[in-house]
Image: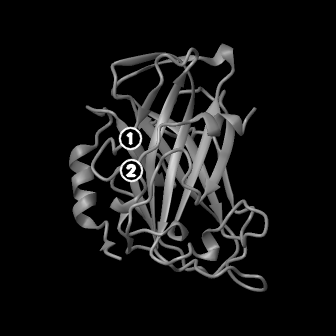
Amino acid sequence: MKRLLLGLGVAAAMLCAASSAFAVGGVNISWSTCFGENPSASRNRTFACASNAGTNLLVTSFVLDTLQLGAVSGTETVVDILSATDPVPLWWQFRDIGTCRQTALGSNSIADANNLVCVDWAQGQSAGGVGAYTSDPGNGWTIDPSVTLGQHRRLKLAFAVPLAGLQDLTQASEYFSANISINNTKTVGTGACTGCNEPICIVLNSIKVTTNTGAGNRTISGGAAAGSDIVTWQGVGPNCQLVPTKNVTWGSVKALYR
């Protein structure tokens, strides 16, 4: 498979494109901190794979692609994970019964209180979590012919506020969406899961911003700045452009929370 190195060129482009106010809509994903807090940092995560302690944090955020959106009730997020090897390494196999690191994947909606740029749109009122982590295409999206199902996982998150917590959002602000946590359990020692050292590409495919009535729902995709929708694990990895076609069907995600 062709390989893509997200290096100094992408970092430089992001520095030119990103600012505290974004001119156009898009989505962001970054290691450890919200993208707008430090646009040039945390595009790649390197881990020595020598300990079972610690957690790796991915932070997702979005910028509206419309002037404003009223009565926002929640966010529904799709993240694609792509490996160069088939199947996805055991270290990246989560949730399903019998997977090597079944409980290593988590999520929350706790925004960093130190953020100066990235706004918690829900003001601490949202709740939800991981809805699915699967290789099953389903719902009409397709895999690039050069990628096998075994090389891919799709993560779905859903968060919402209570009726009293509906918010009106505006364009040009970066809004915190959710954190994704990947802990280091079973990296070394008895029962260790192989594949921690293997490069992985992670793409924030889309964030759907939902409204109370559903009439104004907005599905946002593509980086708010150059490359801000892509991060890597362990550096050089698979071609991030080979992620599956974007999907805007969300009934199955909502059903997981009924």
Residue 145 position, x and y percent, is 38, 65
Residues tagged 2 and 1 counted as in contact (Cβ below 8 A):
yes
In percent of the image, x 71 and y 39: which residue is there?
Answer: 256
Q: Is residue 157 left or right of residue 215?
A: right
- Residue located beneath label 2 in the image: 229
Q: Nearer the viewer, residue 234 or 12?
A: 234
| Res. 221 mark | 1
Residue at the image point whose x is 25% and y is 66% from the top: 8
Q: CA distance from mark 2 to mark 1?
A: 8 Å
192 versus 132 height, above or below:
below
Pointer 2 local density, CA inside 10 Å: few below 14, some 14–19, many at least 20: many
Crowd band around label 1 with a 10 angstrom C-alpha radius: few (<14), some (14–19), many (20+):
many
**Horizontal and vertical percent for residue 108?**
65, 44
Badge 2 amino acid: Asp
Question: Above or below — where is 121 with respect to 9?
Answer: above
Q: Of callouts 2 and 1, which one flags the residue occurring earlier in the amino acid sequence?
A: 1
- Residue 47 in sight in this render: yes
Q: Residue at x 48, y 23 (%)?
A: 217
Which residue is found at the position 59% from the left and 26% from the top? 123
* Viewport quadrant of the C terminus: top right
Q: Which mark is residue 56?
A: none
- Residue 41, image quadrant: bottom left
Vertical order, 28 against 191 (above or below)? above
Quadrant of the snapshot with the N terminus = bottom left
Depth check: give the residue in front, 131 or 227: 131
Q: Amino acid at mark 1?
A: Ser
- Secondary structure of the residue carrying tag 2 is loop
Q: Nearer the viewer, mark 2 or mark 1?
A: 1
**Residue 90, percent across and down?**
64, 75
- Left or right: 219 as drawn, with respect to 129: left
Secondary structure found at label 1: loop
Residue 187 spot, x, y in % from top left = 67, 78
